[in-house]
Image: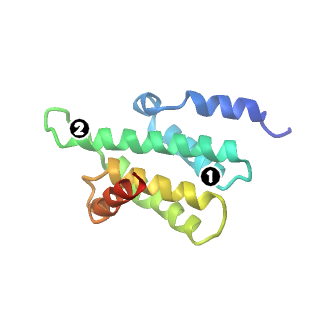
Amino acid sequence: MGDLDYDTIISAYGKLNVVFFHNVEEEHALIILSNSIRDMSSEDLILRQSAFRLLSSFVEYSGQILEQEMKPEQGCSGSWVMYIINNFLLKHMGNAMRKEGAAQKLWIGLLREMVLKLHKMVEFKTYLVLAMLSDVSVR
């Protein structure tokens, strides 16, 4: 058995988006998120960027789930999303930030996405001002 075909991997990343996460089982999503986290440390720029886009899609999906949870008629629980964010993404983000490398910038970008899209989570409320200031300083 050889390695997976690079073009197939990149093509698969292109098909995974927010809608995908709404339609996939939690166990399958976790496997895909695990692969994306691994690919964030890849030497290959395209693979890193593809993994970043997928993780950004998951963050957007997570924000949608948490917003729905605020409306009682939706009945959607965000406990799994909160678990994945707190115990999976933030853990790996912390590990990646301790290492030097090209992936650090992408992890910082993902943290920014999390702060902006998951602002209802207590963990990110204190960072919202910093994200807003970075928007102003970029312009």
Q: Is residue 66 left or right of residue 70?
A: right
Expressed as whole percent of the image width and height from the top left, the position of residue 37 reads 59, 52
Expressed as whole percent of the image width and height from the top left, the position of residue 120 reads 24, 52
Q: Which residue is drawn at the image coordinates 30% and 40% (left, top)?
A: 65
Q: Secondary structure at mark 1?
A: loop
**In this view, 75 is above or below 115:** above
**Rendering quarter of residue 68:** top left
Q: Is residue 91 left or right of residue 98?
A: left
Mark 1, other Cα within 10 Å: few <14 / some 14–19 / many ≥20: many
Expressed as whole percent of the image width and height from the top left, the position of residue 108 reads 50, 59
The three-letter amino acid code for the residue at tag 2 is Gln
**Rendering quarter of residue 31:** top right
Q: Which residue is drawn at the image coordinates 53% and 40% (left, top)?
A: 54
Q: How many marks?
A: 2
Mark 2, other Cα within 10 Å: few <14 / some 14–19 / many ≥20: some
- Residue where numbered disc 1 is placed: 40
